[in-house]
Amino acid sequence: MKRTITHLADGRELIYFDRRDDADRSAIDRRTLGPRPVASELRYDPLTEEWIAIAGHRQTRTFLPTGGTAECPLCPSSDERSTEIPAHDYDVVVFENRFPSFSGNFGTYGDPGGLSEVRPGVGRCEVVCFTSDHSSSFSRLSDDRVELVMEAWADRTAELSGMKGVEQVFCFENRGEEIGITLAHPHGQIYAYPYVTPRTRLQLGAARRYPKGNLFADVLAAERAAGTRVVAANELWTAFVPAAARWPFEVHVYPHRQVPDLAALTEEERAAFAPLYTSVLRAFDGLFGLVMPYISAWHQAPVREDRELGYLHLELFSIRRAPNKLKYLAGSESAMGAFVNDVLPEEAARMLRSQIDH
């Protein structure tokens, strides 16, 4: 793998990840860009003990450009048009988000009054472009390309984990307008948070209280033994619908070996993940013959605390529950955080298994 670091016109870092050692990455960003926004303001909610990022500058980010590749900021640049990627073609690219929720560019933060503590949203937000092909998708990537994406994720996880103030690194992909994407080009994001996220705290708290050993490993072992909710598996990974799935179609993908994060995976584990994961994504699309909206989220151990409890795994879910129906987070879910699932997990697993490549 060749890793090339360069910078965009406003100073943001951009990194090319290439399979070919002779890839030419000398193209420069010819645009004139305004100053970078300051980091968000973090406000503490004493009732939920959670940090909320207030990032007003994100209101101006690019939203669903209608011109296809002619307006897409994630497509390669051409002689006639400059985008976020200066090169005329690329394999995998990572760059600092132009409209970040967290960054190291601090502003002035006042006291809002009340009981809320305020501090700068230190951290970093990056965009990961999986391919230069605007019309492609993660499910259509070759195994080699998925491995290259995983190398980029691992590289960024390791580097961002070493940044001052970063407590957790989150790699994820949002897909589909129903989910809320703002750009259709195949891409994901990486958030380097200045705190441990609420869901991770919940999971690690449960793991800490579990009296029999490692909770994550036991969940995986129980699902593999039961088999009824397993969707796909190989020697190194298992994909299953959790028994208490929140979403109509939800799949968790675990390596068989406990590791804290993506950087700790072996070359063999990364290679084995690629065909299994893309087959699950294609099964999602095959359910109703529609492009399924989804969120794909890597759960990694925090940078400093409870790393021994963490167990790297991916949680993939869709809000589509039927060909013409979406699962909305209405009163119970949004107001109370109490989920009601419309699809029996065992039935969801059966439906997904029927669509897995054979």
Image (cartoon, grey):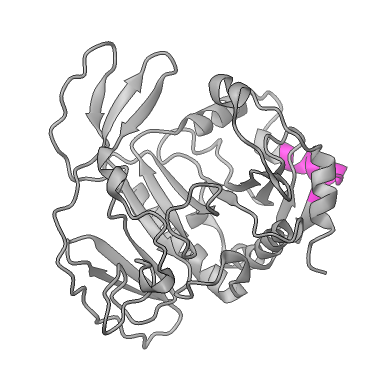
Which region is colored magenta?
219-230
Q: Main secondary structure of the magenta part?
A: helix
Horizontally, residue 32 falls left or right of residue 116, namely left
In the rendered image, residue 136 lying in the magenta stretch gets the answer no
Q: Residue at x 30, y 25 (%)?
A: 43
User: Which quarter of the figure has residue 346?
Assistant: top right
Q: Can residue 291 be seen at all in this image of the molecule? A: yes
Viewer-nearest residue: 290 or 98: 290
Horizontally, residue 30 falls left or right of residue 205, namely left
Q: Residue at x 30, y 67 (%)?
A: 84
Residue 157 coordinates in the image, percent (x, y) = 42, 53
Residue 332 coordinates in the image, percent (x, y) = 62, 22
User: Which quarter of the figure has residue 343?
Assistant: top right
Q: Residue at x 79, y 62 (%)?
A: 356
Viewer-nearest residue: 124 or 345: 345
91 over 7 or under it: above or below: below
197 over 209 or under it: above or below: below
In the rendered image, residue 222 lying in the magenta stretch gets the answer yes
Most extreme residue toward the top is: 114
Residue 217 coordinates in the image, percent (x, y) = 69, 40
Most extreme residue toward the bottom is: 22
221 over 158 or under it: above or below: above
Viewer-nearest residue: 164 or 73: 73
The C terminus sits in image quarter: bottom right
Q: Residue at x 79, y 54 (%)?
A: 352
Horizontally, residue 160 falls left or right of residue 325, namely left
The N terminus sits in image quarter: bottom left
Q: How many marks?
A: 0
Residue 181 coordinates in the image, percent (x, y) = 47, 52
